[in-house]
Image: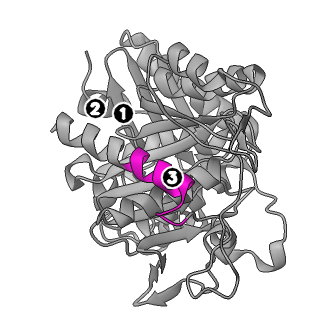
Amino acid sequence: MQSREQVIELLQQVREPQTGRRLIDLHFIRDVVVKEDRISLTAITLDSQEKTRSELDREIRQTLEEAGLSNVHIRIREASESEKSTIQNEQDTGEVADPVLTKGHAVGMEEHELLNPASGVRFIAIASGKGGVGKSTVAVNLAAALARQGKRVGLIDADIYGFSVPDMIGVEDVPSVEDGIIQPVERFGIKIMSMGFFVRENNPVIWRGPMLGRMLRQFFSDVEWGKLDYMILDLPPGTGDVALDVHQMIPQSEEIIVTTPHATAAFVAARAGAMALQTDHKVIGVVENMSYYVSSTGEKDYVFGRGGGAMLADTLHTKLLAQIPLGIPDNHPSEADFSPSVYKPESETGAIYNDIAAQITRLHMESK
């Protein structure tokens, strides 16, 4: 099996189309991950033309295939403005910038302390096959439950098109900037970062895939997270660009798949789980949301059917972490710690989230 260093060595002669310089010299080969028979990487180009990007993809793929490497996932993106500016400055001055010292121009995961597996941070991505199943509710309540256990928790709202975490968790502040570094907003002991902090008046985000990946990378590299035990990632539903970026940037991330009890919802959610498994991410469990409604008489009414969560867990060869009832938190706007979507720890649903958090921390203690 090839190593990361060997893959980089194989790509020494691949050149950036506009400048003719080697991608390796420009530090435009990123996120190289080698796992068994699969290789994934990101390549950056200054050219926005689709034809150029396709040709670069083909050249990298052919180079690796000639070395006997066929199962390769390549992500091609356009350079950011700061990356373009760095290259332009190099051309103007004749000096090559040190990538470690150049803001927003990291060579790969190892240079972001948070993303380095040696940091000890446990990444848990909350994923779903489609929207509307309560994925973000699970993300914010799991983060709150872990924080109640004394864990140092970060929460990234990576659902960049459908950001909702700031509103759900009751955040009214916005991040501050100190010495050029973004300070995350803190609530319920959780450090939070979301696209919602940077969009005015709930306007839509109309971005292409490469721009989404760039923003996600900045959430890691340009934010002062401090020491963390857990980073919860609220992914967009489905298997699109952001999910692919997360799989490449954080190969050590684990996933929880959220579904409803309905068989069709579970069938769709299986795609998100299959994507995680295909990229060697461990699915640590399934959460079945909206499992039942408790009537005033205490009877359980299975509004959306039964069995979807268990079926999905069985398909993905993982465990069903919890079945969460249909409802909303019994919170009042006059409360000092009001939030629309975070359940109190003493509530029935809050206790379920406490149990999920306990299962996760127990799993990680056993794996040490």
- Residue highlighted by disc 2: 4
**Apparent side of residue 9 relative to residue 368 in the rendered image (left or right):** right
Mark 3 surroundings within 10 Å by alpha-carbon count, few (fewer than 14), some (14 through 19), many (20 or more)? many
- Mark 1 closeness class: few <14, some 14–19, many ≥20 residues within 10 Å: many
For the point 60% across and 70% down, which residue is it?
Answer: 169
Q: How many marks?
A: 3
Q: Are the residues flagged by discs 1 and 2 in contact, CB closer than 8 Å?
A: yes
Q: Quadrant of residue 140?
A: bottom right
Query: Which residue is at the far left?
Result: 368
Name the mark nearer the viewer: 1 or 3. 3
Q: Position of residue 292 (x, y in %)?
A: 70, 37
Whole-number angstrom distance, CA of label 1 to CA of label 2:
6 Å
Relative to 197, is 52 above or below? above
State the residue in front, 146 or 343.
343
Element at badge 1? strand
- Residue drawn 64% across and 85% down? 172
**Above or below, 214 relative to 275:** below
Q: Earlier in the sequence, mark 3 or mark 2?
A: 2
Residue type (three-letter) at the residue carrying disc 1: Val
Query: Given contact means CB atoms under 8 Å apart, are the residues at marks 3 and 2 in contact?
Result: no
Q: Is residue 25 visible?
A: yes
Q: Where are the magenta residues, as a range? A: 344-357
Q: Tell me the CA gap for discs 1 and 3.
A: 20 Å
Give the number of the mark in front: 1 or 2: 1
Query: Which residue, given by chain and number where applicable, does mark 1 sit on?
Result: 33
Which residue was labeled with disc 3?
233
